[in-house]
Amino acid sequence: MTLTRSDFLKAMAGLPVLGSLPARAQGQAQPFRIGIVEDLSGTYSGNGGPNTVLATRMAVEDFGGSVLGRPIEVVAVDHQTKPDLGSSLARQLVDQRGASALMLGGSSAVGLAVQNFARERKVSTLVTGNYAASFSGRACSPYATQWAVSTGELAGAIAEGVVKAGGNKWFLLVVDYAFGHDLANDATRAVQAVGGNVVGQVRHPLATADMSAPLLQARASGANVVALANAGPDLVNSVKQAKEYGIRNVTAMLVFVNNVVAMGLDTAQGLRFAVNWYWDLNDATRGFARRMMARNGNVVPDMGHVMGYISTLHYLQAVAKVGSDDAASVNRAMRDLPFTDGMLSNPRIQVNGRVVSDLYLAEVKRPAESRSAADLYRIVETIPGDKLFLPAERSGCVLQTT
């Protein structure tokens, strides 16, 4: 895609009001800025976007609003799922706004471009809404942490159960960019590891409204599982249209609350997938959800939003401990600091920046089981993080700090 001046101006419009805390009087210390490079208005804005900005601002407020004697400011930009635009916006945040850290979400292709820039500039990155495994694998950075569950865990969490239940011949519908490619590769490995086989796959462009051609190809393949290596509206369209074509053996690997709402429980019921956070897990998650929903029109927070909150708090705690925003020092401290908020189960950060925690196998409830608009999942199983996450030495990450 080609970056135009209108793209850039549109993405930068309204920054002071969308992502920032109130303006400070002149004479105060230069703000400590956290930049958010997100999809604020497009395909993935529902599972990240403005609610990730809100969650990040809530973390800043809960931290106390300042660090190193400087007021903290959150500045959000809209990358519109364009890697060249995302890179330009990230450069502007660092060079002109003095951002100490960049939070990444929305599109893995954009996120990888921005993380590469940030690695070169030695700027901390918090990967909260990008799910490609390469962020903490072959494209890792000593200044980055990946909070989003990656494709390896998403595939591994469901493959064994599906294959053991008889779904041993998979056909993959793959969105054609980094996230989809990584998820398809990881799904193939996970299925083969438990004795199944991937009999074929078809790629489709991002934001494909008509999924009939790939679905018909999947139905004709002889597979007994149609697995979706896509997300967001592509996933919603795939599930809805599969039902219209009478394809019942659909498996999804990355599902968000807003996707289930878009499908409706009647269509989504029975889907199983992995999550690292759900609003109704414990007192801490329920308390956070109530606070956030009181500020966002009762939109149920999801794991993409909440990783913005958790990662920001952890990052700011490390900055305070180190006494500077030096990315190398702060990221070493982040890997050592304990987690104390109860929002993740058994969390830790590996040397490659991969945030490991227990995952939950969630199943979408039947309409009759749901007690409210927010009551969407039942938790089937808790999966220990060490069973799913690759250790750093097997991730493909080679760290260089020079």
Image: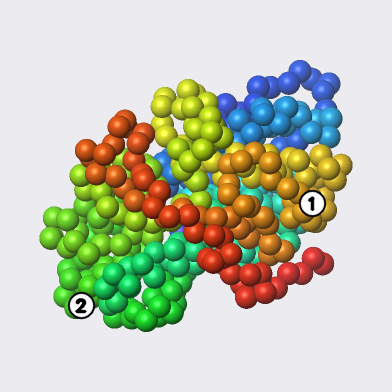
**In the image as oriented, which residue stretches furthest toward the front?**
381
What percent of the width, then of the height, locates residue 55? Answer: 56, 35
**Relative to 148, is 247 above or below?**
below
Q: Is residue 4 left or right of residue 235?
A: right
Residue tagged 2? 221
- Taking depth in this image into account, of 51 and 267 the one nearest to the observer is 267
Disc 1 residue type?
A: Ala
Question: Regarding mark 2 in the picture, which secondary structure is present there?
Answer: loop
Residue tagged 1? 333
Q: In the image, what residue occupies the spot 54% across and 60% down?
A: 384
Q: How many marks?
A: 2
Q: Is residue 163 left or right of residue 275?
A: left
Disc 2 residue type?
A: Ser
**Relative to 76, is 61 above or below?**
above
Q: Residues within 10 Å of mark 1 (few under 14, many from 20)?
A: some
Image-quadrant location for residue 247: bottom left
What percent of the width, then of the height, locates residue 219? Answer: 17, 71
Q: Is residue 347 left or right of residue 321?
A: left
**In the image as oriented, which residue stretches furthest toward the top?**
25
Sequence-first disc among 2 and 1: 2
Q: In the image, what residue occupies the spot 61% across and 41% down?
A: 342
- Taking depth in this image into account, of 346 and 89 the one nearest to the observer is 346
Q: In the image, what residue occupies the spot 25% across and 55% down?
A: 239
Q: In the image, what residue occupies the spot 34% across and 40% down?
A: 376
